[in-house]
Each structure stands twice: as C-alpha cells, then as structure tokens.
Amino acid sequence: MTEAGTRTPTRVPEWARKVAERLGKGPHVVVSGISVSGNIHAGNLREVLVAEAVAEALRERGDTVRFIFHADTIDPLRKIAPGIPESYERFIGHSLSHVPDPEGCHVSYAEHFLAPFEEALREMDMDIEVLRSHELYEGGVYTEVTREALERTEDLRLILQDVTNRRMPEHWSPFSPRSSSGRLTGMRVLEHVPERTSVVFADEDGFEEAADYSKGEGKLGWRVELAARWKALGVTFEPFGKDHTTSGGSTETADRMSREVFGYPVPGRYQYEWIGLKGQGDMSSSRGIVLLPKDLLRIMPPDAVRR
C-alpha cells in the first residue's frame, strides 16, 4: 500500500525471525485472510500484524515477499451484524459484495466494513496488497483450482468426512453457484461442464440454471477454498487463530486437500491467540464486542499497536 523505498521497515520481533527461518528461501507469498461480514476489529488486526511480522523478517534477510490481505468479499451473508436493519434479512445467503451498503456510503456491504480497515492499514504504512475474493473469482484467478475441485468432488467429500467425522450428503459439491435470485446457499449442483467452465444446478425452487465459475458466478466452500487459494496465489505462509487449528478444524481439512487433491505443499503456519476486552470476553463482530483499529490509532502510534 506504499511505494517502494518510501517506507521505514517495521521492527522485527525475534519470534518472527524464528518462524522465517523455518520457511526456507524465497520468494514468499504471505497471506492474511478475514471475513468482511461485520466490523473488522482489533482482534482481526492481530492476524494481519502476525503475518506482517513474518513478512518483514523474510524481507530483512533479503527474500522477495508478496504480502497479501485477502478480504473474503464473495462469502455469503450468514447473519445480520449489530446495527444493521432487520430488513437485511432478505439478503441472507447473498454474496457480501452483492449486498448494498446499509448506509449508502460504499458500493456494497463488504466495502462498508472493508474500507475503514483498509484505511487503518494505510495509516500504519503497511507494505501490503489488498485483494477482494469476488474480484479474484471474476478475474479468473480461481478458475483452474475451481475446475480441479469440481473434477475431484468425491475425493474432497471423503476428506471432509474423514476429518470432520460427519457424513456429507451424496449430492455435496465443493462449489456453491449463485442463482438468478442472487443467493449462494441452498443450490444443488447437478453437472459440471468443464469445457464451458460452468455447472448446471437446481436453484432453491428446483429450477435448473447454469453458473460460469470463470466469471465469479459462485464460490468454493470455505475449507476447499482455503486449500485452493494457497495454490492459486502461491501461498508460503499464513497465520491462523486457535479456532481454525483445532482437531477436525479448517486447517486440518485444508492441509489434506492441498496435498492430496491440489498437489500443493502446505504453507508455513503460526497460531495466535484471540484478543478480548476486559469484562466482555473475546472480540466478536457478531456480538458487537469490538474495538476498531482506527480507534486504537487515535490513542497510540502504529509501532505501539504492533507491539
């Protein structure tokens, strides 16, 4: 987010140097990914700061590093965030990038929550590239890995069953197409047509439609998408909170999918703890327990926030 040669490198903590040592020689792609379904709070910022520290440690030793913030803008709206009108219930299941901004100040619901966070990253002078997942799907970045996932549907289903210890439906698909109603959830994929980069599916009312995944008309499910984007973006390191690294969690699933289906080595990893507010518990956008990065930056300089 800054021009080359115009920023002062951040102080590199010793733990980040040790993580960098385990990653081997570059070039490296360091990624931090967060949902934009609500306020992106200071607890979310911790993930970005962990990734930044490792990226800076790699740069310090002379490696070429691409540092990415992956905003999950294509994800479906699953619940209404605090302060959002109840009328937005009608957008449940729609991509965050396709839901209107409740205050009319940005192009979408996703941008309404992403823009203040992006502004905080700029204020912290981060050498980071912000990518929006809906643009990656629409731009064809995820086309090939989506094709691979659809062709290996049964293998992915069996991995999910084995890791999560729950039976997946026979009609399960790694891809969720977007129907003409705008919804991403509740569809049933009937056929993959690879020569057209599309799937034929039954919508929520049982009518047949088609979706072209090279144009962003749908998305991969979260656990599959995690492994797929490692390959599509060439990821070599990504930190995760403790909720993702538990037994049967998303990283265990993605690790197997990455190796066994996509043929891509599992990126380096660092597990971090959550941040809470005294007397209120862990920060949570869905429960309205948040402290925004911009609020932190009003009372302390960026270097203090990093520490």
Image (cartoon, rainbow, N blue to C red):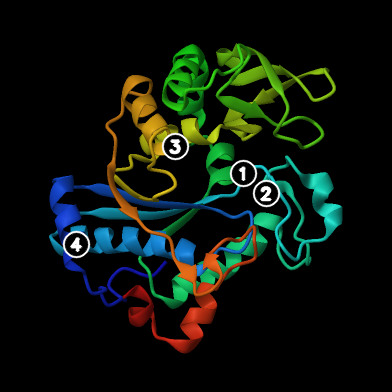
Residue assigned mark 2: 96
Q: Secondary structure at mark 3?
A: helix
Label 1 CA crowd tier, 10 Å (few <14, some 14–19, many 20+): many
Q: Earlier in the sequence, mark 3 or mark 2?
A: 2
Tell me, yes or no, if residue 268 can be seen here: yes
Amino acid under disc 3: Ser
- Tell me the CA gap for discs 4 and 2: 36 Å
Q: Mark 3 and mark 1 in contact (Cβ < 8 Å)? A: no
Residue assigned mark 4: 15
The x, y position of residue 259, in whole percent, is: 31, 25
Q: Quadrant of the C terminus?
A: bottom left
Q: Residue at x 64, y 26 (%)?
A: 212
Tell me: 177 left or right of 53: right
- The image shows residue 167, relative to residue 43, as above or below, that is above
Q: Mark 1 and mark 2 in contact (Cβ < 8 Å)? A: yes
Tell me: 113 left or right of 272: right
Tell me, yes or no, if residue 128 can be seen here: no
Tell me: 139 left or right of 241: right
Amino acid under disc 4: Trp
Q: Earlier in the sequence, mark 2 or mark 1?
A: 1
Q: Earlier in the sequence, mark 4 or mark 2?
A: 4
